[in-house]
Amino acid sequence: MTMDPRMTPSNGRVAHVSLEGQVEAERFVTGRWMMVQQPMVNITDAPRGARVSQLLFGERFLALETADGFSFGMAERDGYVGYILSGALTGAEDATHWVVAPATHLYPKPDLKAPPDVALFFGSQVRVAGERDGYLRIQTGHYIPQQHLVPMKARFSDPVGVADLFLGTPYLWGGTSRWGIDCSGLIQAALIACGIDCPRDSDQQEAALGVDLPEDEPLRRGDLVFWKGHVGIMSSETMLLHANAHHMAVAYEPLDEALARIGAREFGAVTARKRLPL
């Protein structure tokens, strides 16, 4: 059986202990859970390689090997394997809340006029250590408006509503945040926010998510439409919401127009239409 390298935590030198007897490696290790300590960090396919995904502040990464400034391992979010700059990681902490605004500022004190130091993005995870004047103090000592955080177990009920929070976000291959996002990153963010496990890439999503719809079944809000290398979510029977390179942004587009353009110039015919158990 061929193993998907995107989901196989092994690079020849080191592999996760769960793969012993299945892959060749010099060492098999349990690894160490780390946490992203900057607003976002790229996951690359090699040290200084191409971006394949991103992790956000507070997300966890199982580091199996650290060498030459990079850590090799896999993301807790979806099991995606790759390399992360070691300096972007720190010891893992248990998060208590996550960011539900498209972006939020980290204030040095609980004052809306205080100059914020940095921003975090939707999906970032933090540990709340206190509250003052309508702001929540997180582990860095910064303050976040309490309206922008909810407890870790809190979830949305409408993936389309979540995806709409990203409207206008620049298209970015491998992106997963309001700073920049790609088609499958948008779907993953929307579904995870609604408590639905979702893999990273569109081909993985097509294989794992929902049930296939008959060709004559009308689409409805929340249905997914797949092409080879692309995915979008329906906001209604006729309107598609997707991150795409045509608009270079997250945009609404009539499905008929998207079908014609994508079929003629981009990804070809639709490969699947899926309905989620919402």
Image (spheres, rainbow, N blue to C red):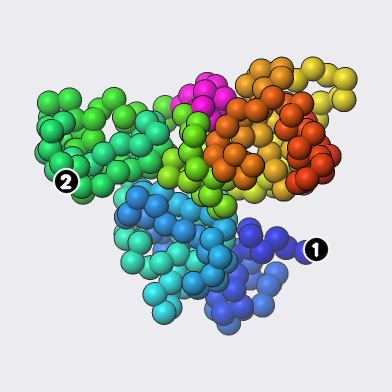
Q: Quadrant of residue 109?
A: top left
| Residue 111 in view (yes/no) | yes
Q: Quadrant of residue 210?
A: top right
Residue lying farthest bottom?
26
- Distance between the alpha carbons at the discs numbered 2 and 1: 49 Å
| Coordinates of residue 256 in the picture (x, y in percent) | 77, 26
Residue found 15% across the figure and 41% down from its top: 115
Is residue 247 depicted above or below 58 in this figure? Answer: above
Q: Which residue is mark 2?
A: 141
Q: Amino acid at mark 1?
A: Met
Decide which of tag 2 and tag 1 comes sooner along the chain. 1
* Of 1 and 193, the residue lying toward us: 193
Mark 1 surroundings: few (<14), some (14-19) or many (≥20) residues within 10 A: few
Assign the magenta stretch its main secondary structure: helix
Residue found 57% across the figure and 58% down from its top: 52
* Of 119 and 32, the residue lying toward us: 119
Is residue 276 depicted above or below 184 in this figure? Answer: above
Q: Which residue is mark 1?
A: 1
Q: Amino acid at mark 2?
A: Gly
Q: Which residues are magenta?
A: 155-164
Is residue 265 depicted above or below 260 in this figure? Answer: below
- Magenta span includes 161: yes
